[in-house]
Amino acid sequence: MRLLCLLSLAGVVAAAPLTPEKLQLIPGLYPRERRELVRKLAPLMGKEEGVREALVLAGIDEKVSERLASLYPGPLLVERYSHGLVLELPDLTERQRVLFTHLHPSVLAAQWSLSWQRRKLEQDAALKKDEILRRRLLDASSRSIREIEKRYWRVVGYALTVEQRAALHTWLPQAYQRPPNLQAHVFQVPGLTPSQASRIQALITEYASETAADTAEIQRLQANREMDAAQKQRAIEAATDRVADVLRAVVERSHKILTPDQLRHIDALPPLLTPGERNQTANYVKQMGLRPEQMKRLEKLAAEVMAKVKAEQARAREKLGGMQGELGGDSPQAMTMQMMQQNVNATRMLAMEEAAQVAVLEILDKRQVLGWVITPRR
């Protein structure tokens, strides 16, 4: 069993059985399309041969199909599918490759160890007598796995360029396609204008309005324990499809509002991270066990970040001029001022991430980065 786990972590299993859980990883599918794919591939469930070919024939990206065909079922499915994708980027620099070659097996091994402990806790007969303690220990184990995952993707966000992260986004599993609070992320893309912000906000309001009834219906159906299961499932799927149709239209319209460069920055957002967590880049880097000489180099980078932020603030003040005295709560000037502040913050985040890239690739050694990723934080 342990040998099988190690083989699965190393990604050397030539073929693995197809499962419904693996199909949930496929990115870019709306619910109706995913259900149709599951029905189409039903004859292959539990089988190993012909999976990759069937996925490709169904229109699934070849890289995604290949990873699914070799991904063994079990714990950490999303993590094991995702991490190796970084090493498959075609344009990694030598420093990037060295870092992620070091991180990849060690991070998964740390998560696997925690997952193994969690399964032991679930089976512990003595703990079953104290449900409160058992739940706390299980939650702590799950939280540690999740925190390691978030720190790993922070490093990905620091070490890769915007273009590399946008390319990686194409292959990431469905669960990693939309970072938390995507709306707030969108309002912090570089160069967002007041006109763009107003149109995006109108789309968000329209989506909320048009999906409110179906969202409430889904919640009502999920809470209904008396309804026939098959009928309930069909009703949930119908409501979910209506919500998805609205979302698809909103996404298509948003692509006509944002520029290609802004859309690339959205695709480059690291999974799992909130806008607030992106704003904490400097604090995270400081936690990586810096030596005095490393701190001096980072202080120089911090000064460069502040210079960029101050320059953007000066441009904003110059453009706003004396507008502040004329601002009303809902005036166009107020929106302009708000977007200027967002642009200053976007400049700050990008500058911090550029500095963090220098830090993890040129200043810190790979052992320091790995230690930060896998060491529990208080």
Image (cartoon, helix red, strand yellow):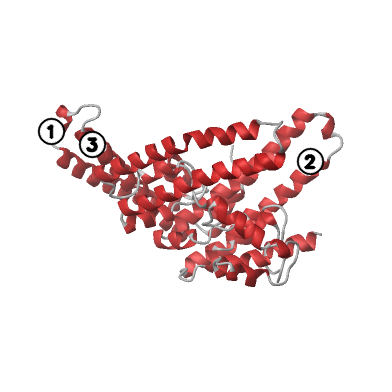
Horizontally, residue 215 falls left or right of residue 232, namely left
Label 2 sits on a secondary structure element that is helix
- Residue position marked by numbered label 2 in the rendering: 121
Label 1 sits on a secondary structure element that is loop
Label 3 sits on a secondary structure element that is helix
What's the CA distance linking mark 2 and mark 1? 64 Å
- Quadrant assignment for the C terminus: top right
Horizontally, residue 93 falls left or right of residue 323, namely right
Which of the labelled discs sits on residue 322, or is there none? 1
- Residue position marked by numbered label 3 in the rendering: 337
Where is residue 346 drawn, in percent x and y?
33, 46
Label 2 vs 1, first from the N-terminus: 2
> Is residue 363 visible in the rendered structure shown here?
yes
Label 2 vs 3, first from the N-terminus: 2
The answer to the question of whether label 1 and label 3 lie on touching residues, with beta carbons closer than 8 A, is no
Which of the labelled discs sits on residue 171, or is there none? none
Give the residue type at disc 2.
Leu
